[in-house]
Structure formats: C-alpha cells, structure tokens
Image: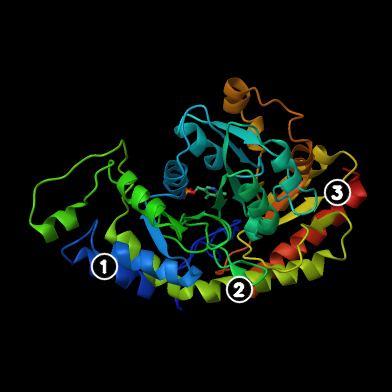
Amino acid sequence: MNLVHTQINKTNPKIHYGHQWIDEADIQAVVDVLRSDWITTGPKVSEFEQAVADYVGAEYAVAVNSGTAALHAAMYAVGVGPGDEVILPPMTFVATANCVVFQGATPVFADVEPDTLLVNPAEVESKITERTKAIIAVDYAGQPCDYNALRNIAKRHDLSLVADACHSIGAQFNGRNVGTLADLSVFSFHPVKHITTGEGGMVVTDETKFAERMRRFRNHGISMDSRQRADHGTWYYEMEDLGYNYRITDFQCALGLSQLQNLPAFLERRRQIAAQYDESFSRLPEVEALGLREGVLHAYHLYVVKTKYPVLNLGRAKFFRKMREKSVDVNVHYIPVHMQPFYRKYFNTNPGLCSVAETAYEGILSLPIFPAMKAADVQRVITATNATVAEMRKESI
Ligand SMILES: *Cc1c(COP(=O)(O)O)cnc(C)c1O
C-alpha cells in the first residue's frame, strides 16, 4: 500500500477527523475500467457486489450510488410505505431518518444507551405500535448494536430489522460479522468511511426477494438492466414499480474492489490508533471514551469522546475551538436528528424526546481517526488533547 494522496503533512498541516486513502493500485483500477467497454452497469458492479458479500458472509449484495440510496432501497425492499412507522435512534446522520420519509412513512426516535450511544433495545420496544414496520439499528462509531436483543424484538413483533452499518463494515458481534446480523445491512463508501468509491453504497442480505426488489429499485423499477437486455438481444423491458436511478458506475466499483483489498489493513490501523487514544485518555478524567460492549470487535469509523465539564455545552464548545486552534479538526457526530428543524416542524419531535442522546450531544467530540494518519499525527492529537485539558483546567471553562 503506497499512499499517493493525502492532505496532511502539507503546508497547512490540519488533521481532519477522517480522510480517504488512495494508492496507485486504486488509480490503475479506475483507469483500466475507463479504457473498457462498460463504464456503468457492467461486470465490475457484480464483481464488487460479490466481493463485499463474500467479505461479510452474506448471500446477496446490491450496489447503489450512495449509502443514502442504499438505505432508501432497504426501506423499499421491506415494504415501508405511507402510514408505517420505523423506529431508529437519533444519534446518527440525517439520512437514516430521511430514508423513512422518502417512503412516506414516519420515523419514530428511540433513545440511546448513555455509555455506548447505541440504540437502547428497551426504548425500541417501548415505541412499537400497530403501525411499526421496521427497526433501523445504527452501529454508531463502528460498534455493533445489541443484535441479540434487537433480533428478538423484531421477531416477537414481526418487524424487519435493518442495520445502518455505514460505520461498521469489518466489525463483529459475538464472533458474527456485521452484514449478517440484520435482515438487511447498509454500507456507505463515502470518502470518510472505511473504503470509498467516491460516492457509493451497498445493501447486503440473505433474502432473494429483497435483493431482487432492490435491483429493480435502483434501475427505475425496471426488471431487466441494459446488460441483461444486451445479453438477451432484446429491446423489451417492463417497469413493474416506481424506482430511481441509483446505479453506481463500473469505475467506482473498480475503485471499491481495489479498496476492499486494503480493508483488513485499514481496520487494523484504526484499531491501533483507537488503542493509543484509549490508553492516553484513561489518564484524563475530563475526556472519557465511549463504552465498549463485551463480545464486540469495533470498526472505529469514529473515535468519540465525551468531554466532561460542569457546564457541558460551554465546555465542549471551548474544547472544540481550542483543538481546532491547534490544527486538529475535531468534529461532532451527531446533532440528534429529532432536533433538526425539519423533524421538529413536520414530525413534532421536540427537545426532551430523547434526553440521553440530547445530553450526550452536549459533550461529544470526534477525534481524527483514519488509516493514513502517521504515528506523529496520532501523537499530535494526543498532545493537543492534553494541552487543551491543561488550559481548561487553568481557565475553568
Ligand atoms: C455516511 C452515512 C450515511 C449516508 O451515506 P452516504 O454514502 O453519505 O449517502 C448514512 N448513515 C450513516 C450512519 C452514515 O454515517
């Protein structure tokens, strides 16, 4: 793996919270496809799908042009529609809730556990009504949710369980791979995620009917794609349902295939960095790592700490500013989705609805973590964190 492009260690040595790794093999893979006959709906799409399905151990994979499109396809696959409710945690990116609204259904927010910030299964169960159709679990930061509890609840109430696994490819729960823990699991290949296709996403599942539905959905609801028509020598096609153009290109899938080769090394590096952070911050009472559940193998898309100050919000704001002044581009993941103006306006989701997530939000901070970080970069983040804590101890928030 020879890294060719990274923006760190140039003239402005800012360390972002996440950044892609692109090497010469990645570039060559894309160029090769650009010189080939198929640049979209070609052989690289199914090759990438098969490779990801094999990697996680799922039967089927359907690639689309974003993680958001993948979430939308999953909602469509399980039959979410107008009048339905889907339960999900608010500690996630807005797309997790938006995909429910795309299908004309209502997102219902279930609060998270205070230590892991993963959805609390008891909260999920308390939100079930006769309209509930599905649960979306979010493997926040890269730690799998409690899938034993969630699968039990889904089974007892006859609900579909979808994993928003955009943070957690390569993670495990009780020795089982993410991608095999829910009815459908969704990945994103945005540049900050573990592997990238520029933009892109995928849904993996063991259910034939879900895979078939999603293949139609990504192609306008048409039952045969252009390569199948070419193979069959026919002009005829049928549009069976309303779908979208959510297709991904072959050059993106070639990039994804090449990136997948590096995924084990990427995961290892992320885990190394996290272990270094854990070790350093265990000495700082003001900076607490998120809880790690027993039996999980974390994928560390994010490294989130809870800053602890008497006036939480003010403390975090100051911490954030001081870190950024030191060229460490910390971030905040996430503003609880139910607090967004859109959800407050159209779904009456006012503050107080998920108080654990809301309180956690006031203190959380995401520190840089990505495979292209060098040892010196990790050390800089640690030094900046120690210095910030020392300054704040003196200044008292
Ligand atoms: C990145 C992400 C998405 C959306 O993926 P895109 O590829 O950016 O559309 C959805 N959910 C979560 C939790 C994510 O982190």
Q: Name the kind of residue labelled 3 in the image.
A: Lys
Picture mark count: 3
Residue at horizontal 21%, vertical 52%?
225
Q: Earlier in the sequence, mark 3 or mark 1?
A: 1
Disc 2 within 8 angstroms of ligand 1 (CB): no
Tell me the quarter of the picture where residue 304 sits: bottom right
Amino acid type at image mark 2: Arg
Q: Give left or right: position of 2 versus 297.
A: left
Q: CA distance from mark 2 to mark 3?
A: 28 Å
| Dot 1 crowding, Cα within 10 Å, few <14, some 14–19, many 20+ | some
Q: Give how far across and how far down residue 180 sits, in percent.
A: 54, 63
Q: Residue furthest bottom?
A: 1
Tag 2 and tag 1, C-beta contact below 8 Å: no
Query: Identity of the amino acid at label 1?
Result: Val
The residue under the point 44% across, 75% down is 261
Q: Secondary structure at mark 3?
A: loop
Q: CA distance from mark 3 to mark 1?
A: 49 Å
- Rendered position, 211 above or below 124: below
Q: Image quarter for residue 173?
A: bottom right
Q: Residues at badges 2 and 3 in contact (C-beta under 8 Å)?
A: no
Mark 2 closeness class: few <14, some 14–19, many ≥20 residues within 10 Å: some
Identify the mark at residue 269; answer none if there is no mark.
2
Residue 163 shown left or right of residue 39 in the figure: right
Q: Secondary structure at mark 2?
A: helix
Question: Residue under circle 3?
Answer: 308
| Residue of label 1 | 31
